Image: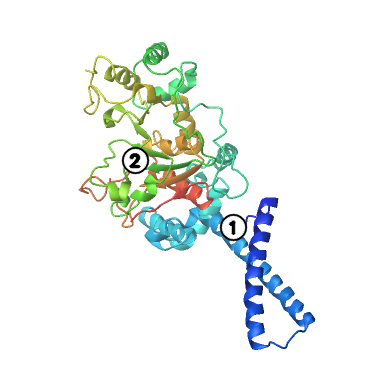
């Protein structure tokens, strides 16, 4: 529990408040006493009463200030009570139990042991026999998070040597490019990548504008995934109340405002999932191949006419001064140090969560994981395949990490419906 400290200004206000109450009650007491006991002139009895009254009022005032501080301390953890009527521990317990039974067939009684093993960096150890190296990765990942002391609501940005966004000064290592090439079997070489990146910053800002709130002591952020569990959640007003609102891929708003909100400050995408944006929204590109960088250049200039595994927009409407491109070295770092190399590469949704650590102080997650019936789909699609999972992304590992961050109060994970 956060300690309560009274500054001189607080003490003076408490004094004025107590003294005002004392004078008013003294006036009422004197008037009533004179009416009922006009002959009672015992000064000792009167001053004894005044002293007891003053002590009582001071005690009541201090209790009131203390309760108010507790309310401020826990306000963030209670802001969703209107949706589910449960505190954080109940949400964690219910959602963890459902998640484990849906994916692993494990019992609810194993949840605590899973969390303990995750905290020790051993969650993936039984699967690949590398528990020792995973202890090291877990320690490094925890060292990268510098949390502020006190309320537990705000924390400093992630302290990492890997820059998450590309700039004109970025020097990608050949080791990082080698990892990048294997994501989608890139055919271009390292020199061609550097040449394309140079062309990129002839059009877009050499140093990206991250869109961080400038005047907030503790900036709030809503990372909005596309899970089916958003449908019917009525999270819209809560999402719109945040300073930064990050959406991703197709993520329609029209027709779903009550559940997903109406505002967007950042939109994360890749060419095959691109959508037009307004002039105030940051376009955040996650490149999975050199073709994606070429698309970004062409989509803002001559128009793109290449081909990919899915249809691609030839042109895009967005503000070129608000374009941000994710660093492939950052993608590699997330895959290795956060996911322990599980899956082919991180999902867009998971990378967006890690990106949020570099933009915001207080992070709330919406639209992640399956719904309460264990169904994996998008809120804007009609569910056709009930056995749909997460493809080549390590969906289970990603969601387990999000649950761990939620359990440790690093982020706030809203389970939806």
Measure how far apart labels 2 and 1 are at the Cα level.
31 Å
Q: Residue 52 carries which label?
A: none
As drawn, 24 above or below 246: below
Residue located beneath label 2 in the image: 263
Measuring from the top left, give residue 167's x and y in whole percent: 46, 19
Secondary structure at numbered mark 2 = loop
Circle nearer the N terminus (2, 1): 1
- Asked which quadrant contains residue 5, the reply is bottom right
Q: Which colour scheme is used?
A: rainbow
- 175 and 284: which is toward the camera: 284
Name the residue at 54% across, 35% down.
158
- 94 and 344: which is toward the camera: 94
Would you say 135 lies left or right of 77 here?
A: right
- Asked which quadrant contains residue 22, the reply is bottom right
Name the residue at 47% across, 35% down.
213
Residue located beneath label 1 in the image: 69
The crowding category of the residue bearing disc 1, from other C-alpha atoms within 10 Å (few below 14, some 14 to 19, many at least 20), is some
Measuring from the top left, give residue 20's x and y in whole percent: 64, 65
Measuring from the top left, give residue 179's x and y in whole percent: 43, 25
């Amino acid at each position: 529990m956060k300690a309560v400290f009274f500054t001189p200004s607080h003490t003076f206000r408490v004094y004025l408040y107590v003294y005002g109450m004392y004078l008013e009650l003294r006036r009422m007491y004197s008037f009533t006493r004179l009416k009922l006991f006009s002959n009672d002139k015992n000064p000792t009895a009167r001053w004894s009463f005044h002293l007891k009254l003053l002590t009582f009022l001071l005690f009541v005032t201090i209790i009131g200030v203390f309760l108010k501080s507790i309310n401020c301390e826990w306000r963030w953890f209670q802001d969703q009570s209107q949706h589910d009527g449960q505190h954080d521990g109940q949400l964690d317990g219910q959602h963890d139990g459902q998640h484990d039974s849906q994916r692993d067939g494990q019992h609810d009684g194993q949840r605590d042991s899973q969390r303990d093993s995750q905290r020790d960096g051993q969650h993936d150890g039984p699967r690949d026999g590398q528990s020792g190296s995973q202890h090291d990765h877990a320690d490094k990942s925890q060292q990268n998070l510098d949390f502020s002391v006190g309320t537990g609501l705000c924390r400093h940005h992630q302290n990492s040597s890997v820059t998450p966004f590309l700039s004109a000064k970025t020097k990608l290592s050949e080791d990082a490019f080698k990892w990048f090439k294997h994501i989608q079997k890139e055919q271009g070489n390292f020199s061609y990548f550097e040449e394309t990146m140079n062309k990129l910053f002839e059009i877009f800002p050499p140093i990206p504008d991250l869109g961080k709130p400038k005047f907030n002591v503790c900036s709030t952020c809503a990372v909005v995934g596309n899970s089916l569990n958003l449908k019917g959640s009525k999270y819209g007003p809560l999402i719109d109340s945040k300073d930064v609102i990050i959406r991703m891929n197709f993520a329609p708003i029209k027709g779903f405002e009550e559940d997903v909100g109406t505002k967007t400050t950042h939109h994360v995408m890749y060419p095959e999932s691109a959508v037009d944006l307004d002039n105030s929204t940051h376009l955040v590109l996650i490149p999975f191949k050199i073709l994606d960088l070429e698309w970004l250049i062409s989509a803002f200039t001559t128009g793109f006419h290449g081909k990919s595994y899915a249809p691609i927009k030839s042109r895009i409407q967005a503000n070129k001064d608000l374009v941000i491109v994710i660093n492939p070295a950052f993608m590699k770092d997330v895959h290795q140090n956060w996911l322990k190399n599980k899956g082919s590469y991180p999902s867009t949704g998971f990378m967006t969560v890690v990106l949020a650590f570099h933009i915001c102080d207080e992070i709330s997650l919406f639209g992640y994981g399956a719904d309460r019936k264990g169904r994996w789909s998008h809120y804007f699609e009609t569910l056709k395949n009930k056995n749909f999972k997460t493809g080549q992304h390590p969906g289970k590992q990603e969601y387990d990490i999000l649950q761990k961050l939620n359990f440790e109060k690093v982020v706030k994970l809203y389970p939806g419906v």
